[in-house]
Image: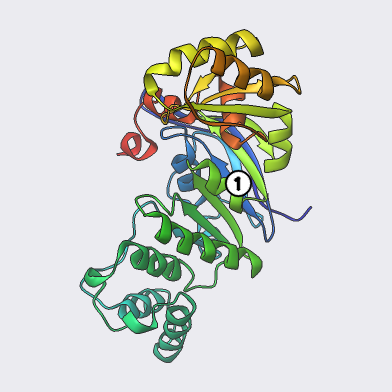
């Protein structure tokens, strides 16, 4: 295995708050490693340590063989970083933003213009290249921010929740670009709290909660840990959720998980559970909007590992990584 990022026992505290409590992870060359967890779990702190923006209290981390503490300049020369919010100058045009960054990287003027033009075209910003960034949509700014992180042709790219605040269409635009980067051989470490995003993009996953790694593996292997299919039920009326939950608990032998949409989920260990549950709901005169079997999701994995959903984890979490660091 060609390891590009290697982390052992990483720890970091901000006052009395333990942001990282012994994080271990590895990323392979040319793959997407998804760092998955709720707000405040330690994802951003991990990225900031790897990008040499924070010094860890304990543990060791290397990027492309360079220690992030002992050789930060060597690390910075090989990486790109896109944070949670677009870091571009709104008063400049898209092209001028990229040229500025290229010149700050000591690129000759002609080479800077050529590289900016390449990235403007690659990220579908040609029609808006000369417009001021303040006129860009959120998705366009995000794409420009990604382009800026690639000016120096990094071998490793850190993407810290790159789709935060974007609508579904703009999120898909950014995800398409991440797929293309990985296909070009860039090693990507992607932090996200969106389970479906990690499922779509990541070759490998590390699940982090309260500063600790609680699971790692491929999306398929983590789902296999949950095992079997899941029965999903959504009553037509939210007032029927308690009654539906009681029926499912009696049939499945476990308390159903209820998400924000009012959907209930239990493990379908018995092959006839779908049919039996449907009959019980009819007998109880419960109107059901959705009823079916599905393979486990990453949300099911998180629930199995932690005993709570990602939504509950975020409600219970303390300050986010950025709030703590500030």
Colour setting: rainbow
Q: Position of residue 67 (x, y in %)?
A: 60, 50
Q: In the image, is residue 131 above or below residue 10?
A: below
Q: In the image, is residue 157 above or below residue 262?
A: below
At 46% from the left and 78% from the top, the residue drawn is 119
The image quadrant that residue 74 belongs to is bottom right
At 58% from the left and 66% from the top, the residue drawn is 181
Q: Residue beneath label 1, please?
A: 199
The image quadrant that residue 295 belongs to is top right
Q: Position of residue 281 (x, y in %)?
A: 55, 17
Front residue of 112/133: it is 133
**Residue 55 visible in the displayed image:** no
Q: Residue furthest right?
A: 1
Q: In the image, is residue 133 above or below residue 138?
A: below
* Side of 37 relative to 199 (left or right): left
Q: Position of residue 186 (x, y in %)?
A: 62, 64
**Residue 125 visible in the displayed image:** yes
At 61% from the left and 24% from the top, the residue drawn is 305
Q: Position of residue 192 (x, y in %)?
A: 49, 45
At 57% from the left and 46% from the top, the residue drawn is 198
* Side of 216 relative to 245 (left or right): right
């Amino acid at each position: 295995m060609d390891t590009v990022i290697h982390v052992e026992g990483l720890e970091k505290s901000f006052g009395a708050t333990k942001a990282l409590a012994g994080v271990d992870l590895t990323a392979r060359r040319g793959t997407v490693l998804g760092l998955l967890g709720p707000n405040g779990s330690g994802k951003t702190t991990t990225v900031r340590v790897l990008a040499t923006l924070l010094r860890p209290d304990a543990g060791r981390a290397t990027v492309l063989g360079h220690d992030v503490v002992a050789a930060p300049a060597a690390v910075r020369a090989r990486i790109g970083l896109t944070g949670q919010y677009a870091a571009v100058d709104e008063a400049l045009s898209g092209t001028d933003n990229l040229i500025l960054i290229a010149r700050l990287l000591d690129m000759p003027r002609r080479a800077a213009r050529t590289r900016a033009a390449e990235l403007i075209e690659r990220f579908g910003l040609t029609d808006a290249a000369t417009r001021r960034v303040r006129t860009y949509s959120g998705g366009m700014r995000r794409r420009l921010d990604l382009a800026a992180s690639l000016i120096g042709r990094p071998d490793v790219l850190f993407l810290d929740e790159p789709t935060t605040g974007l609508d579904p269409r703009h999120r898909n635009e950014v995800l398409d670009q991440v797929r293309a980067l990985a296909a070009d051989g860039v090693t990507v470490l992607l932090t996200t709290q969106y389970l479906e995003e990690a499922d779509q993009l990541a070759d490998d996953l590390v699940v982090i909660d309260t500063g600790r790694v609680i699971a790692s593996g491929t999306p398929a292997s983590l789902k296999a840990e949950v095992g079997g299919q899941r029965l999903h039920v959504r009553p037509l009326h939210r007032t029927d959720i308690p009654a539906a939950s009681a029926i499912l608990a009696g049939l499945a032998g476990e308390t159903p998980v209820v998400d924000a949409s009012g959907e209930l989920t239990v493990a379908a260990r018995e092959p006839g559970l779908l049919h039996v549950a449907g009959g019980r709901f009819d007998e109880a005169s419960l109107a059901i909007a959705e009823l079916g079997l599905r393979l486990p999701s990453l949300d099911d994995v998180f629930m199995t590992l932690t005993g709570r959903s990602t939504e509950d984890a975020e409600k219970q979490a303390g300050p986010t990584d950025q709030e703590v660091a500030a």
